[in-house]
Image (tube, helix red, strand yellow):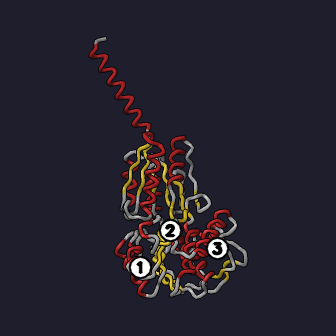
């Protein structure tokens, strides 16, 4: 064999080996509802993506698309990612549920993971965090620290996840402060800094000295920073740039361990459809640092509640509790089952606002 033919054969073999190596990489995709720099929800999901890259190194390739609107645009984006060879796709917003199911039906060999949804399929899993556990702790601190007895709540959409959070925060604020009142503004967005800032400002003008949010940007924190004596809580991410106040603590969504585990399952060929709902106990919900702006006794109570929730000693929704209309919901000592919580569409007694239809 001539030297030229030998070199050509070697180059071909090297090329084929490189192609095989590239083909062996597991491709993991992420569809985001907001920008990765939102400082909240999408920022934390993208931290999970980066953790996958760090954990697996050259064995994976990750891709993402940010700021994908819920609806038809989502279906197009998910389809494109599947066509580009993704082995596993995480779709990270409630409104991506039906588009995920639709695309999954067309790509049976691709594995899909949908965040916060409830519809599964043989190649679609669902996963969510028990954010309401963190909201209960925030409600306790809010009830103890408000001086106006008015707590403002910026809500995104009237879905069970958001309604659960409002109820959890209110129940625990009212437990320590029977005079507390919640004022709720529905922003009808997950991420819109201008709308979120306007909502925070409107609530402060209505007398709220505590702002809770179930939206994704830091705009409410910035609005509260301009007002005297108002405290806030980070949503989905630590939002630590606003501590020690107005941001006095936060709910942090830690997706990294789940993303790593599910990527490993695809690599191992052990991935199966499942429905996961994890909380403080499993580490998917973390409580950010409670700053010294919170009185020491209140901080101690909040941390004790966190521990009791983590060990299963305490359930956030424990009776006696009534529904907003005064009808009985949970008897003394009775706890809410997951099926009820996953579909909850009512407020608890004491909340005066109406849930939009």
Near mark 2 (Cα within 10 A), the count class, few <14, some 14-19 or many ≥20, is many
27 or 300, which lies in front?
300
Residue at left offset 52%, top offset 83%: 146
Across and down, in percent, residue 230 comes to 45, 80
The residue most toward the right is: 332
Tell me which corner region of the image, top left, top right, bottom left or bottom right, holds residue 96: bottom left
Badge nearest the viewer, 3 or 2: 2
Q: How many marks?
A: 3
Residue at left offset 51%, top offset 70%: 291
Near mark 3 (Cα within 10 A), the count class, few <14, some 14-19 or many ≥20, is many
N-term-proximal mark, 3 vs 1: 1
- Secondary structure of the residue carrying tag 1 is helix
Badge nearest the viewer, 2 or 1: 2
N-term-proximal mark, 3 vs 2: 2
- Residue 357 visible at all: no
CA separation in Å, label 3 and label 2: 20 Å
- Say whether marks 3 and 1 touch (CB < 8 Å): no
Residue for badge 1:
200
CA separation in Å, label 2 and label 1: 17 Å
The residue most toward the top is: 1
Across and down, in percent, residue 352 comes to 54, 87
- Secondary structure of the residue carrying tag 2 is strand
Near mark 1 (Cα within 10 A), the count class, few <14, some 14-19 or many ≥20, is many
36 or 205, which lies in front?
205
- Say whether marks 2 and 1 touch (CB < 8 Å): no
Residue for badge 2:
250
- Residue 317: numbered disc: 3
Q: Is 305 situated left or right of 244 in this image?
A: right
């Amino acid at each position: 064999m001539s030297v030229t033919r030998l070199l050509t054969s070697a180059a071909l073999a090297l090329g084929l080996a490189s192609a095989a190596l590239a083909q062996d990489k597991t491709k993991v995709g992420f569809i985001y509802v907001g920008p990765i720099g939102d400082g909240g929800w999408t920022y934390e999901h993208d931290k999970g993506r980066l953790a996958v890259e760090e954990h697996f190194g050259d064995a994976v390739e990750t891709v993402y698309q940010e700021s994908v609107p819920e609806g038809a645009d989502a279906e197009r984006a998910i389809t494109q990612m599947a066509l580009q060879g993704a082995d596993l796709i995480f779709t990270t917003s409630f409104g991506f549920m039906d588009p995920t199911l639709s695309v999954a039906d067309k790509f049976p060999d691709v594995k899909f993971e949908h965040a916060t949804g409830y519809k599964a399929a043989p190649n679609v899993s669902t996963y969510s965090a028990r954010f309401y556990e963190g909201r209960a702790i925030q409600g306790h601190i809010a009830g103890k620290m408000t001086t106006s007895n008015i707590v403002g709540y910026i809500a995104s959409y009237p879905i069970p996840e958001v309604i659960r959070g409002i109820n959890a925060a209110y129940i625990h604020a009212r437990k320590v402060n029977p005079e507390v009142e919640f004022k709720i503004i529905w922003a009808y967005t997950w991420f819109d800094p201008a709308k979120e800032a306007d909502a925070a400002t409107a609530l402060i003008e209505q007398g709220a000295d505590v702002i809770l949010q179930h939206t994704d940007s830091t705009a409410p924190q910035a609005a509260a920073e301009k007002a005297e004596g108002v405290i806030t809580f980070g949503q989905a991410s630590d939002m630590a740039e606003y501590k020690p106040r107005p941001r006095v603590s936060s709910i942090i969504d830690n997706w990294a361990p789940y993303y790593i585990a599910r990527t490993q399952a695809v690599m191992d060929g052990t991935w199966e459809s499942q429905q996961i709902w994890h909380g403080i106990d499993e580490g998917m919900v973390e409580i950010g640092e409670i700053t010294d702006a919170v009185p020491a006794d209140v901080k101690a109570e909040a941390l004790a509640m966190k521990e009791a929730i983590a060990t299963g000693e305490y359930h956030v929704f424990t009776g006696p509790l009534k529904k907003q209309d005064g009808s009985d919901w949970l008897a003394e000592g009775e706890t809410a089952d997951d099926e009820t919580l996953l579909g909850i569409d009512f407020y608890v007694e004491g909340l005066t606002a109406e849930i939009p239809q």
